[in-house]
Image (spheres, grey):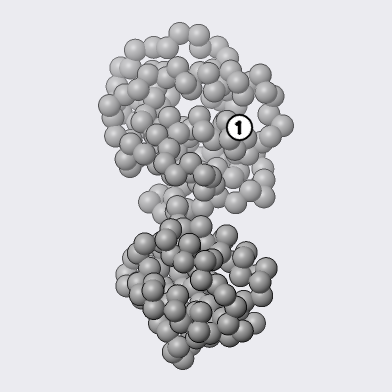
Amino acid sequence: MLLAIGYWRSVDDYTLPDPSRFVDASWDQEERKRTIEYLEKGEEIAVEVIGNVYDWCRFRSKEQALYSTPRTDGYYVWPQSLIHYLKDHDIRLPEQFVKHVRKESVFHEMMTTDIDFSWWKKQQGFTISGKKSYLSPVDYGLLSINNDTKKDLKVLVSNFFKENTRVRRKYAALDAIQKGLPVAIVGSFSNLNTLLEDLVLINVKHRFEPYDFVDFESMRSYTKIGESGTDPQE
């Protein structure tokens, strides 16, 4: 039985560990380097563990897609994307695995394709780092904007809509925002935080009400313009 490690929680599986609990920038750099090199030497195996060949970063880093083909040393199995977390997000792995890395110099032939997640799911990490992790690569919810002072938001909002191709009635919404009409959009949004931060800086009324993914799945995306209930508070 191969022990799984390095698979993170998401909307598809809430029972897996939260990577933000494993962030430790103080972890010994030689130990980190040794562990990364060990993970990189893992043998790729043609076994579907979770999801697709590609995964997304739970910290929503700039890397849009992470290669997540399973690798193994004959004892453990991990996604190739785990290396990204150790290199770019200061992830430290549980001591049981680190000790294993210290003593194993030769990989063993894989005797089984059965995978056990029970040990990994019990791992609690080390601390609350303050670094936010996400359950999905996008935000789901209701975005309301009221540009009642009619600031020129054409470039800002059109760039946001270009990254969110599934927004309904985007051209009508952009026109309404420019005219100062309240707009409410229910959908899934990429790079939402950047838009919200910019709206705060230029003092435009807005609100985002996040939805649980399960609730969102049962809804239809929509865009309302100039209707009651779309006007966000100050």
Residue drawn at x 52%, y 62% is 192
Q: Answer yes or no: is residue 232 visible.
A: no
Residue 96 location, x and y as percent? 56, 25
**Secondary structure state at the residue bearing disc 1:** loop
- Residue that lies at the very extreme toward the top in this rendered image: 106
Please name whichever residue, 231 or 135, is drawn nearer the observer in this view of the structure: 231
Residue 2 is situated, as x and y percent measured from the top left of the image, at: 38, 25
- 94 to the left or right of 214: right
Circle 1 Cα neighbour tier, 10 Å, few/some/many (<14 / 14–19 / ≥20):
many
182 in relation to 160, above or below? below
Q: Quadrant of residue 206?
A: bottom right
According to the picture, the residue beneath numbered tag 1 turns out to be 92
Callout 1 amino acid: Arg
Of all residues shown, which one is farthest toward the bottom?
A: 228
Residue drawn where x is 50% and y is 79% of the image:
177
Task: Name above or below for residue 54 compared with residue 189.
Answer: above
Q: Residue at x 46, y 91 (%)?
A: 228
Above or below — where is 125 with respect to 2?
below
* Apparent side of residue 199 relative to residue 224 in the rendered image (left or right): right
Residue 45, horizontal then vertical, whole percent: 31, 24
Report the residue at 39% width, 72% height from top. 170
Q: In what quadrant of the picture does the N terminus appear?
A: top left
Q: Where does the image place residue 83, in percent across and percent down from the top left?
A: 50, 29
